[in-house]
Amino acid sequence: MRRLKLAAAQLCLGSALAAPAACVSNPGKAQLLTYSVCEVALHPQRFSGRVVRIAGTLTTDQLHSVFSDRRCPGRGLSHRIGDMPPARRDDLNAYLASKGIGGGGFKEIDIILIGTVGPYGDFGGSEVAASDFSEP
């Protein structure tokens, strides 16, 4: 058992050295660290292919949206929720509706998207393929 815990700790440490989307020590569990949209948008190569928690501001009317960060204007991430299980997509839509989104016009809400970061488009952009979400 001790060897198993040591191996898990080494794997976690190795991940931390290789990429910032590392786990932190938690008895028996790996936990994702939370990064800002700015961190991911400014250094997408560090996060590419990794599952991370990304905190930012979703500006949306439920048809069009932008996932951005007030601390770095002009930067943002594309996002998609197609990888999110249908029940969680329903939860997300209910959460957005509870915040008044969908009644016309754009609104902003702070949110955390959990998903895989990857390239987007032909111009060096990045996106998060969200598999879950949470309130900040």
Image (cartoon, rainbow, N blue to C red):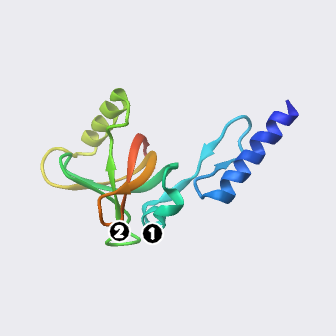
Give the quadrant of residue 69. Answer: bottom left
Q: Residue 2: x, y in percent?
A: 87, 34
Residue plotted at (45% across, 47% down):
116
Horizontal arrangement in the rendering, residue 107 relative to residue 21 (left or right)? left
Q: Nearer the viewer, residue 46 or 102?
A: 46
- Amino acid under label 1? Leu
Quick one: label 1, few (<14), some, or many (20+) residues within 10 Å?
A: some
Number of the label disc, if any, that sits on residue 8: none
Against 91, residue 14 (above or below) is below
Number of the label disc, if any, that sits on residue 75: 2
Instruction: Measure how far apart labels 1 and 2 are at the Cα level.
Output: 8 Å
Q: Residue 11: x, y in percent?
A: 72, 45
Q: Residue 25: x, y in percent?
A: 72, 46
Q: Secondary structure at mark 2?
A: loop
- Number of numbered tags placed on the structure image: 2
Residue plotted at (41% across, 71% down):
71
Against 135, residue 127 (above or below) is below
Horizontal arrangement in the rendering, residue 93 relative to residue 19 (left or right)? left
Contact? badges 1 and 2 (CB < 8 Å): yes
Against 83, residue 100 (above or below) is below
Residue plotted at (34% across, 33% down):
91
Q: Residue 124: x, y in percent?
A: 36, 65
Residue found at the far right of this picture: 2
Q: Give the mark nearer the N terminus: 1 vs 2.
A: 1
Quadrant occupied by the N terminus: top right
Residue plotted at (22% across, 46% down):
101
Residue found at the far front of this picture: 122
Q: Secondary structure at mark 1?
A: helix
Q: Residue tagged by mark 1?
A: 42
Residue found at the far left of this picture: 104
- Amino acid under label 2? Arg
